Amino acid sequence: MTNELVVPAWLAVLVAVAVLALAVAAFRLSRSVRQARGHTEALLAAAAQDAEALREQLAGIEAELQEKQEGALRSDRTDGTERMPVATVDDREYVITDLGQENGPRVPARVVPAPLFADILLRESVIKTAALAAGLRRALSPEVRNRIRFEMKREVKRSRKERRLMLRAARRDLESRRRGALRPDVEVSS
């Protein structure tokens, strides 16, 4: 007598292999998830350390600026009245993106394929050429040339008028000196 629920041996082996394969895949997946989680946590910890270092650096800079302002206020209080702080010239150049880095790692520029580079270059040069042409067309338009001509005439008239006034004043001064030299000195008798 045979049992109707008998499973063939090859099917039992196939199911066992499939279960084993699923177990191995689940193990590898859980290991990769743990590694990714560990990597993410390490990145978050590094970011938190960087943020804390930047906070400390910013606090130091603020304290230094506060000390400079207080020193400037103390030196300005000579007559007992409080004056506004005078801005001091700082020769250091600050770049916002390099604030927390002394000589940090440089990120190489992205490599652009040659056809894309040529396309970008041509578009940029065409845009610049079009802008230059539009500017020249506007600068050399009849309205602008007429305005320039009008302003030049006005300036020439103003300078001629000023020269005539100066010449008249110089002539008057010269004539008054000549009259003063021709006049006999009058002695006062007491």
Image (cartoon, grey):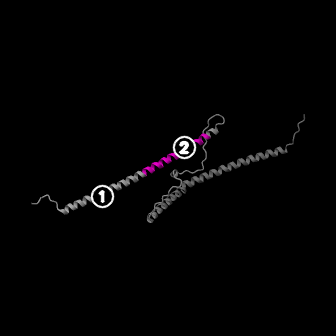
Q: Is residue 160 left or right of residue 23?
A: right
Magenta part of the protein: which range?
A: 43-71
The answer to which of marks 1 and 2 sits earlier in the sequence is 1
Label 1 residue SS: helix
Where residue 139 sits in the image (x, y, percent)? 54, 56
Which sits in the foreground, 179 or 53?
A: 53
Main SS class of the magenta portion in the image: helix
Which sits in the foreground, 62 or 40?
A: 40
Q: Mark 1 or 2, which is nearer the eye?
A: 1
**With respect to residue 156, does 62 lie above or below?**
above
Amino acid carrying mark 1 in the image: Ala
Which residue does the image show at 25% across and 58% down from the upper left? 19
Checking the image for residue 62, the label placed there is 2
Q: Residues within 10 Å of mark 2 (few under 14, many from 20)?
A: few
**With respect to residue 66, does 154 lie above or below?**
below
Q: In what quadrant of the picture does the C terminus appear?
A: top right
Q: Residues within 10 Å of mark 1 (few under 14, many from 20)?
A: few
Taking the view exactly as shown, the residue that stands out farthest to the bottom is 114
Where residue 128 sits in the image (x, y, percent)? 50, 59
User: Mark 1 highlights which residue?
Assistant: 25
Amino acid carrying mark 2 in the image: Glu
65 magenta-colored:
yes
Label 2 residue SS: helix
Do the CB atoms of the residues marked 1 and 2 lie less than 8 Å apart?
Answer: no
Alpha carbon distance from label 1 to label 2: 55 Å
Q: Is residue 145 left or right of residue 127?
A: right
Where residue 20 sits in the image (x, y, percent)? 26, 59
Which residue does the image show at 54% across and 45% down from the upper left? 60
